[in-house]
Amino acid sequence: MRMIHKELEDFQLERGWEISKESADKSTESLLLNHLLLTTEIAEIAEELRRMLNRAYDMKEEGVEGEKAFQLAKEEVAEDIGKEIADSIAYLCKFATFFQRDIEQDIKNKLNEIQSRTKPNLQKRMKEGVR
């Protein structure tokens, strides 16, 4: 993750696409713009998911078996959704750069946090015989 983050950071710097650190006003403007762009990319992922599900539904209506229709629709959108995921990750890395965050460490910390709060619940449920 660190290598990809660094590669994206360098790419964005070369093109002048980084979030401005010039002043509070410029940073605010740049943060808001990049937030808008990130949410647009996330919406494009949602659009690809919608396209996939609609395509699977249409194929089932045409007589294609459900699992096969789902798989074919998934294959149809895979490349496009991959592009939107990559765009979203690029914007997230841009925010991480601005806030001087180590994404890899932040992910590990978050996983540990989730693990620590779910483990007791899981152990309790197992003792009670609930899975």
Image (cartoon, rainbow, N blue to C red):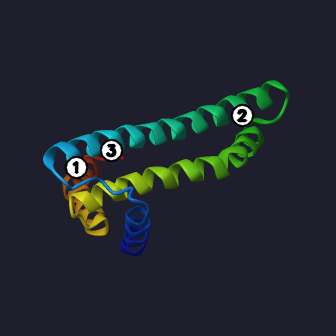
The quarter in which the N terminus is drawn is bottom left
Residue occupied by mark 1: 121
Horizontally, is 123 left or right of 50 in the view? left
Percent across and percent down for residue 16 are 38, 59
Question: Could you tell me if the residues under marks 2 and 3 are in contact, i.e. CB atoms within 8 Å?
Answer: no
Which residue sits at x=53%, y=41%? Answer: 45
Q: Is residue 14 above or below residue 89?
A: below
Which residue sits at x=15%, y=50%? Answer: 23
Residue occupied by mark 3: 130
In the picture as drawn, the residue positioned furthest to the top comes out as 61
Percent across and percent down for residue 101 are 23, 63
Q: Which circle's residue, 2 or 3, is located before the other in the chain?
A: 2
Residue occupied by mark 2: 56
Q: Which image quadrant is residue 51 in?
A: top right
Q: Which circle's residue, 1 or 2, is located before the other in the chain?
A: 2
For label 3, count other residues whose C-alpha is less than 10 Å away and answer few (under 14), some (14-19) or many (20+): few
- 3D distance between C-alphas at marks 2 and 3: 35 Å
Q: Check disc 2 and report its element: helix, strand or loop.
A: helix
- 3D distance between C-alphas at marks 1 and 3: 11 Å
Percent across and percent down for residue 66 are 74, 36
Under mark 2, the amino acid is Ala
Looking at this view, is 79 or 93 the one in front? 93
Under mark 1, the amino acid is Asn
Q: Check disc 3 and report its element: helix, strand or loop.
A: loop
Under mark 3, the amino acid is Val
Which residue sits at x=29%, y=45%? Answer: 30
For label 1, count other residues whose C-alpha is less than 10 Å away and answer few (under 14), some (14-19) or many (20+): few
